[in-house]
Image: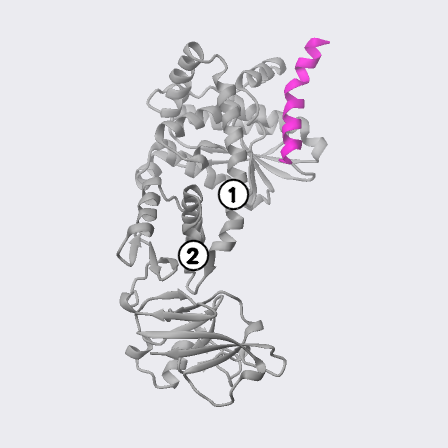
Amino acid sequence: MRKEREKYYLLKSVQMFVDELRLLEENDTVLVGVSGGPDSVALLQLLLELKNIYTLTLVVAHLEHGIRGLESKEQASFVSDLAEKLGLKSVVLYVDVPKRCHEMKSSLEEAARIVRYTFFKETAKKIGATKIALGHTANDQSETLLMRLIRGSGLEGLASMRPKRDFSPSVIRPLLNTYRKDILAYLKEKNIAYCTDSSNQEISCLRNKIRLKLIPLLEKEYNPNIVATLRRTASILSEKREWIASILKQESKKCFHYGSDNCLIMDLPYFSSQPLALQRELIRCAVQKVTLKHYKLDYTKVCLALDWVKKGKSKCFSLSDKLYLRKADDTLLIEQKRKKPLHESKVFCYKLHVPGHTWIPEVNIRIQATILDWSEIKGEFNPEKAYLDASSLHFPLYVRSRRAGDRFSPLGLEGTKKLKNFFIDAKITRGKREQIPLVVSDKTIVWVLGMRIAGPFKVTQKTKKVLLLEKMR
């Protein structure tokens, strides 16, 4: 009876992990990454045992990376034969990773990782897979934590691998809570063959050195359960990471505001009032929102940026060769550098004080903002004043310089037109265009100072509260 329980222990353990985190759903098409090693072979066998429970469609994927010559080819043949024996479709691709490594100017390990994940994602999309299953184990998780700790990493890195990454398709790791010794026992019990990767014994690779040298030392001299301890630590840090991500999502809504050209505007007083750890995360989050990708901003650069926000006298701080920070009154702008940037002395963006006045030193103009009742409106036309329906506006408002691609809905005209064409029609010379501020609500131009308001914000008979903006010298 005991032997029977042990036989099904791993399957039940994996199924509980899968159900707890909802890694699999009914009718999933799963692309299974199989290298031929014990972990991935066990993953494939376990998914086969769970196939009927979730009504899964399984497809095997293998990348022959060409790193170990004949051994790589034999391993690819092993995976193809295994898939055929199990009655599964397989996709095997050869890529000269050493050559790609030279082209990418990266380590062999990093090049192999990038090529492998690219292959999995592209193949998954071709076959319509809903999940990509990978055979990373609790031991891999422990090794990853140690490796990132040694190289230097924050919470995001130390939390290590996620059981599920919500890409399209999702990447899942059903064995991330399973130890390698249990996997080997499972394969032995079922008499399942697998390949041994000789490169896993090469000490020159940091991960191998950690697995073969450091972890045995820690087990012997400090903690015999170090792998379990590290896995548990990674799990705790992962929970903290998710918690912080939820807080960051809430705080970014309070702190961020989009300008045009994907420029991100941050409320500087609010940002400065936050704890230092949250300021760091807000900077990283803002950069990712502007670049629209997971842009890695290292710890040193974030520290320098925060120091500049507090003490810097210059108007700009370079985050990278493509990004910069700009301080403007009580706002902080994060923008992508232009190939042909606008004149720096004329680029500005300030939050409009309502009610109150806002000074724009770049063009030597002050804007006075007043809230009025509809009955207080005076009927005279004055291009230096703008009467706006307060209920149609999204606060806070900003006053900024023009940007490439700006469009405007001039009062009296249907639809929108390019701001550039609006200036041309009004015979405004190119030099003077840089000196005309724009009041914006979200990304929409509300008032071109001294010229015209936008039609959607005009005062009507239904208006109750009016925002009066006055241009003053």
Q: Is residue 354 left or right of residue 104?
A: right
Q: Residue at x 44, y 21 (%)?
A: 197
Please provide the residue range marked out in magenta. Answer: 1-23
Tell me which colouring the rendered structure shows.
Answer: one colour
Q: Amino acid at mark 2?
A: Met
Reading the chain from its start, which is encountered first: label 1 or label 2? 1
Compared with 71, 173 (above or below) is below
**Residue 182 or residue 128, whichever sits in front:** 182
**Residue 229 or residue 186, whichever sits in front:** 229
**Residue 187 or residue 456, whichever sits in front:** 456
Tell me the number on the disc at residue 101: none
Q: Amino acid at mark 1?
A: Ala
Q: Where is residue 445? Give x, y as percent.
A: 46, 73
Q: Residue at x 55, y 44 (%)?
A: 246
Question: Which residue has dot 1 on it?
Answer: 245
Q: Quadrant of residue 460?
A: bottom right
Q: Where is residue 254? Give x, y as percent.
A: 51, 55
Query: In terms of secondary structure, where does tag 2 sit?
Result: strand
Q: Are marks 1 and 2 in contact (CB under 8 Å)?
A: no
**Residue 191 or residue 435, whichever sits in front:** 435
Compared with 32, 389 (above or below) is below
Which residue is situated farthest in the bottom direction here?
380
- Residue 287 painted magenta: no
- Residue 21 painted magenta: yes
Q: Is residue 444 left or right of residue 327?
A: right
Q: Residue at x 55, y 46 (%)?
A: 168
Compared with 378, 304 (above or below) is above
Question: Which residue has dot 2 on it?
Answer: 266
Cα distance, mark 1 to mark 2? Answer: 18 Å
Label 2 neighbour load within 10 Å: few <14, some 14-19, many 20+: many
Q: Main secondary structure of the magenta part?
A: helix
Q: Quadrant of the C terminus?
A: bottom left
